Each structure stands twice: as structure tokens, then as C-alpha cells.
Image (spheres, coloured by chain):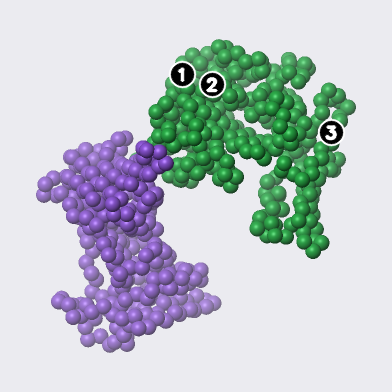
Chain colours: A green, B purple
């Protein structure tokens, strides 16, 4: 629906016979932006925009066919990459809020642009955003802001479990700017602290998700501590009392980097990616963001392990294929690498 | 801690939206001040609020005295100072924080400011904003402040009007601002000179270029007709210019902070010593002293 003409040819690779390969590639956004600068001017002059790729020499070509026979061609080099997919089951989150991006933007305006993290705390009767301050913050210098909202302000409000999640505000601002431009409401899916929080927008033409890890506070939760391992994106699937057949391998990941499974402190946030299978969905183009892992070091005594990751996938659906879109589980234990098959998949984001 | 030593310091002020202009104007004053200095002193008395910057070396010798009547801004004002005979509170704060807290105050239903002591003394600004639902949005900002002990209150006395040579009304601030901003690109220092015939020149001089902007027919405030008139100005040749060379950045900051044209804007020049700016709005008066550089 987005494109007038969309043609995708599978490039079959003799090594991976069973799977069709899409072309995951990454471009530097700064290189692409100048192509589409000045939307007004483009709207007036450009009749057609054609995007084509030549995988052999790693080029993607943008051609703007303008009035009066003028053709602007931009050749950009891309790098092949293995996109990271977050293993995260949105539908299993107990807390779901849906609100227009304008409201969120109005809330975020109260925080200074230098504010790194904020805390969202919900109960069935109230919602509160407040600036996050670490324990060793010098309060005599720091301004603390709190915003209280009533659940009525949300288009959809479901709070299954009282929770307080802390996440990176800076990343969210980017998504808010984007969603304001599209005018689509934002859905927020989250759980307790330590589990990821997802901000997503969904529209006829596109779907975008921002999944952020949340701060895991060691003091708060006792026995489910080991599950709060930040690199377990979809830790809801790893809890033994919530079995979900789709992600059998997620539990395996937790064992590898975790040195002290039952320790009250959170394990080290080290992202170990063993094998990254290709995306199976045919008409899905995923654009992977760069995970920024701030591993807090090997110290076990650090009570907070901060791990910020950003996954932003813009998905354009060619056809409505509700069940067919699946992403393969990203990090699998090395022993299951060989029997990777279409069954090993997590629900689409 | 100073806060406890000073005894009870209860303070509750409520700024309500029945006077919608108030929040905005107070925001405007705070905005101006936040452009002039990073930290300043807030002095609270029963009738007035003062924003004070004393002329320490750290400020480059510039000092500021800004006075406003609390009745013009607050619907409710309760204050208890240190002791009955010293019914005042002196706080040190970062005006930028206050400015940010009041950013949305102009569309607020109510604004409440309270002095509290949680981890440290704070000004708690609670803004009640309208919302789509029946209950309002409440935004709370805790602005850390420092309580200034009584023994150094003397540092913050009102500066006296200097014995000036020339007193003159300023040109339209918008024009003056754009001139100074352009001059700032060329030089770090600017010379202000004026005479009692309503003429003012702004001059900069570098190795490569010298630029002068002339203003005339500005008018001179009638100090001479008041009691206790300044002797330096009396009997002075009307054409003779008094001048002072000052840091251009300070002047630019002062002008940049003015969003609304003041009712009265004038400056007093003590030749080669200091320039004293007075900006009067309806309910706020701002005095800014910029010392002359050698």
C-alpha cells in the first residue's frame, strides 16, 4: 500500500537451502537523509522515487525522477548485517496503555532534555511519570519532577500488576517525534521492573516498535531475580510458571552468561549472540537498530545493572498475513544451532 | 544544616489562574533573570520578592536587583521568616530551574509554590494543568535551594543609586538588542556613551574595524528636578559625553532577556566606572549594574 510497485527477488544461497533469504542491510541514516531533505520541495518537483538494490556490489540506489526530465540519482553503499530481533511477547504483558502521542509529548516536555531516565509507575487508579534519580544523586543540585495523570486520560488503560519501570527517556523522545508526525496513537506494553517495556505505533501503512530494557532493582524482587537478566529480552517467557511453547531457547541463554544464578544481585548484562538466523517473513523488511549495551562491568556488588537497548523496526506489510510473520529467536544456545527450523520462532513484534 | 538552624521557615504561595497573565509575567521575569545569571538569591519578605545578584568577582562584577510586589503575582501568600523581627527568608537558587518549572504555568489552572525540606531544602512548585479528563494533571517540580543564614544577609542589601554623570532613556530595546548582538560578533567590549541632550552612542573598536551606532532624541530622565539630585549631573555641559567600556556579553544578556518592552528603560552612566540600567515594568523593577573595564 505504501509503494506503487514493489518487487522482491529471493536470492537463493546454496548454503542455506531451506530458507529464503531476504536482504538485511544497514545504511547510515545520515547518508539517507539528504536524499529526502525538504519534503515540500520534493513534493512539488518529484514525480516518482525509485529505490533499487544491487546486492552484488552492495549498492542501494535512490532515484528521484523530477519534473522537466531532471533525474537525481543517489548511490549509497550498504553493509550487510544481521539484524537483532527482540524476543518479546507484547500480548503477554499485564500492563497495556494506549494514548495519543501528543499526551506523552506534553508530559515529556516537563523533563529537561538532559534527563536520561524516567520512571513510570502505575496502579489501577493512577499513573505517574517521574525523573529517575540514582541513590547517590546529590539532591541539593538536582531538580526532580513528577507528573501525575489520571487513567481517564488514556485511550486504553489496563493495569494487571502495579509496577514501577525505569527506562531511557532519550530513546523514547525519538519515537514520540516520529509518532507525532504520523499521528498514530502509541501503545505501551510493560510488566514489572526489569522486564522490557515496548512502545509501539501501528497504522495501516506501518508498524514501529521501540523496546527498551528497564532498570532492575536488586533490592526489590527476591526470588525472581535471576529472571531479570537484562539481556533476556522476553523474560516473561522464561518464567517457569508461564510456559510458552514458542520460545524454548530463551531459558538457555540465561544460563550462559549468568554466573551466579541465585544471587540477589542482577547478573552481568553481556549480550552473547550465538547465531543469528535470517528473517523468515518474506515481505518484511526489518530495520535493525544498534543495541547499545552498557554493560555495568563484572562487579557483583553493583545493585543496578543498566542495559539500554533499542530496537526499532519499521515493518511495512505488503499483504495482511496475520500468522505468517515470525522472527526467529535471536540468541540461541549453541547446541541447538543445527536444528534451527521454522518452528523456532517468537511472535511478531 | 542551615535550614534547621534558621528555625521554622514555612512558606506557601499560591498563584492562581484567575489572573491568567500573572503566571506568564512571573515566568517572564524569571526567564530574564535566568539569562543573566546562573545562580541568584531570592529574598522573600511579607510584601515583596527580590531577586538579587551581588557583585562578586565570580559574576564579573555585575550585580542585579530585581523587585516585585507579591500581591501582583500571588493570590495567596504566606510566609514566616526566621524570627518576628527578621521576617524574611533568603534562598539561593538556580533561576533556570524555576524558569523551567513555570514553563507551562501560563496554561495552568493553579500554581502552588512551597518551601519544603525533603532531602534538602526545596521549592516545590506544583502546577495543576487542565486535562481531557475530569481530574487535572499535577506536575510537581522539586527545585533544590540553599537557605542563606542570617549572618550574611548584609551581603544582599539594596545597592544605592550611583552618583551618575549622565542619565538617559534607552532606545527601543529591540533595536538596541539587534545592534549589540551584531557588535558582539566583532568585539568583546562595547563603549556606551551618552549626554544630557538625549544622545547615545554604542561603539566598538578592534584592530580592523570600528563601528558606532548613534541614537538621538532619547530624552533624559528628570532627576535634576527631584530632591537630592545628583551633583555630578548638575551644571554639566549638555553635550559632553559620559562613557564607560563594558563587557558586551553582559549587555547582550540583559537585552536578550527582555521579551516585553518595559514601561521605562534608562541607564545611568558614571564615567569610566559603572553603568546602571533600570528597567521598569508594570509590577517589576529590574536594576542591573555593569562595571566599566579599565
Circle 1 residue: A221
Dot 2 falls on which chain?
A: A
Q: In what element is the residue under mark 2?
A: helix
| Labels 1 and 2 positioned on one and the same chain | yes
Are the residues at dot 3 and dot 2 in contact (C-beta closer than 8 Å)? no
Q: In what element is the residue under mark 1?
A: loop
Quarter of the image where the C terminus of chain A is located:
top right
Q: In what element is the residue under mark 3?
A: loop
Left or right: where B22 falls relative to A291 = left
Q: Which mark is residue B167?
A: none
* Earlier sequence position, callout 3 versus callout 1: 3
Left or right: where A261 falls relative to B200 = right
Q: Residue furthest left?
A: B85
Circle 2 residue: A228
Whole-percent x, y for residue A301 in the image:
48, 22
Whole-percent x, y for residue B141 in the image:
36, 42
Amino acid at each position: 500500500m505504501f509503494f506503487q510497485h514493489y518487487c522482491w527477488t529471493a536470492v537463493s544461497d546454496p548454503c542455506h537451502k531451506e530458507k529464503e533469504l531476504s536482504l538485511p542491510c544497514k545504511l547510515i541514516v545520515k547518508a539517507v537523509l539528504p536524499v529526502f531533505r525538504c519534503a515540500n520541495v520534493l513534493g512539488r518537483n518529484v514525480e516518482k522515487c525509485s529505490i533499487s538494490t544491487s546486492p552484488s556490489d552492495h549498492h542501494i540506489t535512490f532515484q528521484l525522477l523530477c519534473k522537466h526530465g531532471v533525474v537525481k540519482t543517489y548511490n549509497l553503499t550498504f553493509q550487510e548485517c544481521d539484524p537483532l530481533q527482540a524476543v518479546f511477547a507484547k500480548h503477554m504483558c499485564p500492563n497495556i496503555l494506549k494514548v495519543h502521542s501528543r499526551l506523552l509529548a506534553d508530559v515529556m516536555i516537563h523533563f529537561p532534555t538532559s534527563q536520561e531516565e524516567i520512571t513510570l509507575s502505575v496502579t489501577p487508579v493512577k499513573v505517574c511519570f517521574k525523573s529517575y534519580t540514582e541513590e547517590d544523586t546529590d539532591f541539593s543540585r538536582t531538580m526532580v519532577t513528577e507528573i501525575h495523570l489520571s487513567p481517564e486520560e488514556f485511550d486504553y488503560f489496563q493495569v494487571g500488576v502495579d509496577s514501577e519501570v525505569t527506562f531511557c527517556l532519550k530513546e523514547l523522545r525519538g519515537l514520540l517525534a516520529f509518532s507525532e508526525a504520523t499521528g498514530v496513537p502509541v501503545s505501551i506494553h510493560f510488566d514489572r521492573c526489569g522486564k522490557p517495556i515496548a512502545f509501539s505505533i501501528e497504522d495501516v501503512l506501518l508498524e514501529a516498535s521501540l523496546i527498551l530494557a528497564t532498570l532492575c532493582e536488586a533490592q526489590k524482587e527476591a526470588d525472581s531475580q535471576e529472571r531479570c537478566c537484562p539481556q533476556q529480552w522476553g523474560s516473561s517467557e522464561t518464567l517457569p510458571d508461564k510456559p510458552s511453547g514458542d520460545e524454548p531457547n530463551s531459558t538457555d541463554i540465561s544460563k550462559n552468561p549468568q554466573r551466579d544464578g541465585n544471587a540477589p544481585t542482577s547478573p552481568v548484562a553481556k549480550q552473547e549472540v550465538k547465531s543469528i538466523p535470517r528473517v523468515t517473513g518474506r515481505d518484511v523488511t526489518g530495520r535493525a537498530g544498534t543495541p547499545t549495551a552498557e554493560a555495568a562491568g563484572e562487579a557483583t556488588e553493583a545493585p543496578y545493572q543498566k542495559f539500554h537497548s533499542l530496537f526499532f523496526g519499521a515493518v511495512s506489510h505488503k499483504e495482511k498475513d496475520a500468522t505468517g510473520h515470525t522472527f526467529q529467536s535471536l540468541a540461541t544456545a549453541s547446541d541447538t544451532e543445527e536444528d534451527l527450523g521454522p518452528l523456532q520462532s517468537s511472535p511478531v513484534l | 544544616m542551615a535550614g534547621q538552624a534558621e528555625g521554622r521557615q514555612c512558606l506557601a504561595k499560591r498563584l492562581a489562574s484567575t489572573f491568567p497573565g500573572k503566571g506568564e509575567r512571573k515566568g517572564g521575569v524569571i526567564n530574564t533573570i535566568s539569562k543573566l545569571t546562573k545562580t541568584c538569591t531570592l529574598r522573600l519578605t511579607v510584601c515583596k520578592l527580590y531577586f538579587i545578584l551581588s557583585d562578586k568577582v565570580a559574576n564579573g562584577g555585575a550585580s542585579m536587583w530585581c523587585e516585585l510586589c507579591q500581591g501582583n503575582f500571588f493570590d495567596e501568600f504566606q510566609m514566616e521568616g526566621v524570627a518576628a523581627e527578621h521576617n524574611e527568608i533568603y534562598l539561593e537558587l538556580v533561576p533556570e530551574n524555576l524558569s523551567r518549572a513555570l514553563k507551562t504555568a501560563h496554561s495552568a489552572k493553579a500554581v502552588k509554590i512551597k518551601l519544603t525540606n525533603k532531602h534538602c531544602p526545596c521549592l516545590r512548585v506544583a502546577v495543576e494543568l487542565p486535562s481531557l479528563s475530569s481530574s487535572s494533571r499535577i506536575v510537581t517540580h522539586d527545585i533544590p535551594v540553599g537557605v542563606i543564614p542570617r549572618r550574611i544577609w548584609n551581603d544582599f542589601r539594596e545597592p544605592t543609586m550611583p552618583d551618575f554623570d549622565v542619565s538617559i532613556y534607552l532606545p527601543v530595546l529591540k533595536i538596541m538588542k539587534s545592534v549589540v548582538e551584531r557588535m558582539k560578533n566583532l568585539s568583546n567590549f562595547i563603549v556606551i556613551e551618552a549626554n544630557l541632550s538625549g544622545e547615545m552612542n554604542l561603539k566598538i573598536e578592534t584592530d580592523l574595524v570600528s563601528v558606532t551606532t548613534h541614537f538621538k532624541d532619547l530624552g533624559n530622565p528628570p532627576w535634576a528636578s527631584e530632591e537630592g539630585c545628583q551633583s555630578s549631573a548638575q551644571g554639566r555641559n549638555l553635550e559632553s559625553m559620559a562613557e564607560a567600556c563594558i563587557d558586551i556579553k553582559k549587555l547582550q544578556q540583559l537585552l536578550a532577556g527582555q521579551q516585553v518592552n518595559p514601561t521605562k528603560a534608562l541607564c545611568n552612566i558614571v564615567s569610566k566606572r559603572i553603568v546602571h540600567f533600570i528597567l521598569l515594568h508594570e509590577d517589576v523593577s529590574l536594576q542591573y549594574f555593569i562595571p566599566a573595564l579599565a
